[in-house]
Image (cartoon, helix red, strand yellow):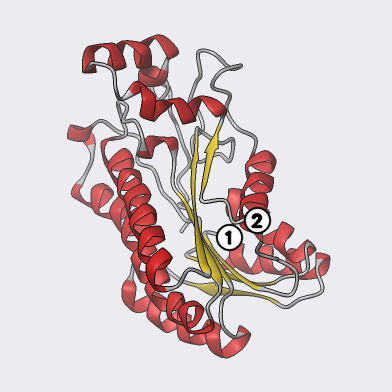
Amino acid sequence: MTTINNKHVLITGGASGLGRRLVLRCAEMGAAVSILDLDEAGAQKAAAEAAARGAGPVRAFACDVGDRGQVAARAAEVLAAQGAVDILVNNAGVVSGKPLLELSDEHIERTFRVNTLALFWTTRAFLPAMVARGSGHIVNVASAAGLIGSPRETDYAASKFAAVGFTEALRLELKRSAPGVKTTAVRPFYIDTGMFAGVKTRFPLLLPILKEADVTERILRAIQHDTAQVDMPWMVRTLPLMRMLPVWAFDGIADFLGVTAAMDEFTGRDAPGS
């Protein structure tokens, strides 16, 4: 079991969306909270609101988590201000939502910097202290797109496949070297945070657009119970089994469920959650 009360929780992308809600809930549960986010004003606002709800200190740090130099500098500030991190939630993410040939080089690089490389930089910054004391928890918010690709998500899906692989390999490494440090991979379908504004689902009962509040509570329960994997909704759990089918059958099911058309009316939002 991992307790949240009286622990130091660091959340990336905590200025808005799912990250902001996690910041508020962790503060309410008695944690000291640190926020890393590119949106300094938004992060400061979230910190102020969280501090008003909780007993522990809440601090915001402006940081592009895809920039390893910035992460290293902010990590030193976090450790000096708040002490060692007990729970790291890698939540920051971006999405381009364009076909491959419409993506700029900058779009592709940004997606991998924030969605994939940031996991390496933050984990390498805060994991050593966890290993030294034999306890800690790392949560990586990936996506169901880390299990199945779809049109207009070539960069996003590839970055989330990498995030899922990173978390799995890290879990097995830590099982050998530091079994007291736990990991959680979060693999949700689309969430109503605004990041995926415009996405559609053909069968809302099977593949609902998830509620931000519901995903938040599932993540918090996963931390408390040391759950290695969170898949939402339940249909996501069937994807590994579907992979056993021939490719034409797998693609046919994805077409029927509307997965391959979900991004057709995507509009998204301009502000990245990083």
Residue appearing at x 35%, y 45% in the figure: 160
Callout 1 secondary element: loop
* Percent of width and height locating residue 26: 71, 62
Cβ–Cβ below 8 Å for labels 1 and 2?
yes
Callout 2 secondary element: helix
* Percent of width and height locating residue 272: 45, 52
Q: Nearer the viewer, residue 157 or 67?
A: 157
Residue appearing at x 69%, y 47% in the figure: 217
Q: Is residue 66 visible?
A: no
How many residues crowd mark 1 within 10 Å: few (<14), some (14–19), many (20+)? Answer: many
Which label is found at residue 14?
1
Residue type, numbered disc 1: Gly
The number of callouts visible is 2
Residue type, numbered disc 2: Leu
* Percent of width and height locating residue 54: 80, 68
1 or 2: mark nearer the eye? 2
* Percent of width and height locating residue 132: 48, 84
- Mark 1 and mark 2 lie on one chain; the one further toward the N terminus is 1
The image shows residue 218, relative to residue 234, as above or below, that is below
Which of the 4 image quadrants contains residue 35?
A: bottom right
Q: The N terminus appears in which quarter of the rendering?
A: bottom right
Q: Residue furthest bottom?
A: 80
The image shows residue 139, relative to residue 158, as above or below, that is below
Disc 1 to disc 2, C-alpha distance: 7 Å
Q: Which residue is mark 2?
A: 22
Q: Nearer the viewer, residue 42 or 134?
A: 134
Which of the 4 image quadrants contains residue 30?
A: bottom right
Q: Nearer the viewer, residue 192 or 227?
A: 227
The image shows residue 266, relative to residue 63, as above or below, that is above
Q: Nearer the viewer, residue 56 or 251?
A: 251
Q: Is residue 124 visible?
A: yes
Residue appearing at x 31%, y 34% in the figure: 153
